[in-house]
Every structure is written in C-alpha cells, then in structure tokens.
Image: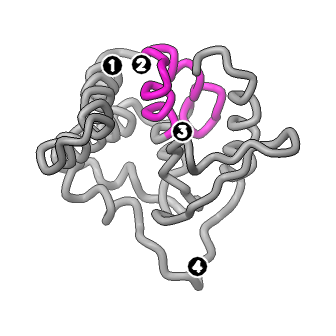
Amino acid sequence: MPGSADLPLVAAALTELQGITAPANIEIKDAADRWAPYAPSGTLRHFAGDALLHTDFAPDNVLITQGRARLVDWAWPTRGAAWIDPGALALRLMDAGHSAEQAIAFVGCFPSWRNAAREALAAFGAATATLWREIAEQHSDEWKQGMAEHAAELERVLGTDL
C-alpha cells in the first residue's frame, strides 16, 4: 500500500536482483520471446538483455521476514532487460493502491528504469496492457479484471511524455 514500511524492503530486494545476470547455462525464457505476442511491432529489441528477472511481484510472491523482503515463487523466471522487473513491480503497486504516477515515481529509484529508452517503457506498457486484456477476456475473476484496468492505465501513462 502507499506509504507501507515494506516498500523500502521490496526496493532493496529488487536492487539486489538487478545486479544478477541470468546464468547462461540454465534454460529460461527470454523476455523478447515472452512478450513477442504482445509487444508493438519493432520494439522487441528493447526487451533483450541478460538480467535475471522475477517478473511476478504478486503479494504472495514477496515474503517480508526478519526485516527483509525475499522474492519467492519463481514460476516465470526470465532473461531480459533489467528495467522489466521495475515495470512489473509498478503494475503490482498500482494493484495495491498506488496511482500510475506514484508507481512510476517509486520504480524511478532503479537506474535500469530511469535509464531505459522511453520507447522501451512505452512498449512495455503496451505489451503489458495487451497481455492483461487477453487474460481478462478469458477469465472473469475480479482481480484479473482489475489488473487489466491497471495495465491499461500504465500503458496510457507510459505512452505519454514521462
């Protein structure tokens, strides 16, 4: 939630993860492949990278214990551009009650996000909105509908001049 004492702990965990390169000898999905069906044409190059990405900051996947946040449930490990995880976190912050602007301001503490090309962030917003719109069309669960709405708002904000 906005103002939560857990936010600095989550930022610290993600900062630590941002420094980890995905092991080359382990087969995991590449971000460009993962977002290929959803990203705008010609933008997949922005998703490429060698960072180890968690990509799913759902509340059950961030365990706060002993004064530290731990990322658990690595169901979607991905190799790609480091800025993707802050984008995924921004969407979950919105689901927790942050506005899109607040969520984007929070993830601005990560150099990978701050230094990403505006076109890359806009492509992420569009890809995320398309993905969640597809999920919401297939499932009427209230939380999935909410995520689709948040993703559409994230797309709108990332598509404007940040």
Q: Is residue 162 above or below residue 74?
A: above
Horizontal side of 150 relative to 19 (left or right) equals left
The numbered mark, 1 or 3, whose residue comes first in the sequence reads 3
CA gap, disc 1 to disc 4?
34 Å
Q: Which residue is mark 4?
A: 24
**Principal SS element in the magenta part?**
helix
61 inside magenta stretch: no
| Residue at left offset 41%, top offset 71% | 29
SS for tag 4? Answer: loop
Q: Give the image location of residue 157, x and y in percent.
A: 33, 19
Disc 1 to disc 2, how far (Cα)?
Answer: 7 Å
**Which is closer to the viewer, label 4 or label 3?**
3
Q: Which residues are magenta?
A: 89-114
Residue to which mark 3 is pinned: 86
CB within 8 Å, label 1 to label 3 = no
Q: Which residue is mark 1?
A: 157
Mark 1: secondary structure: helix
For the residues bearing labels 1 and 2, Cβ distance under 8 angstroms: yes
Amino acid carrying label 1: it is Val
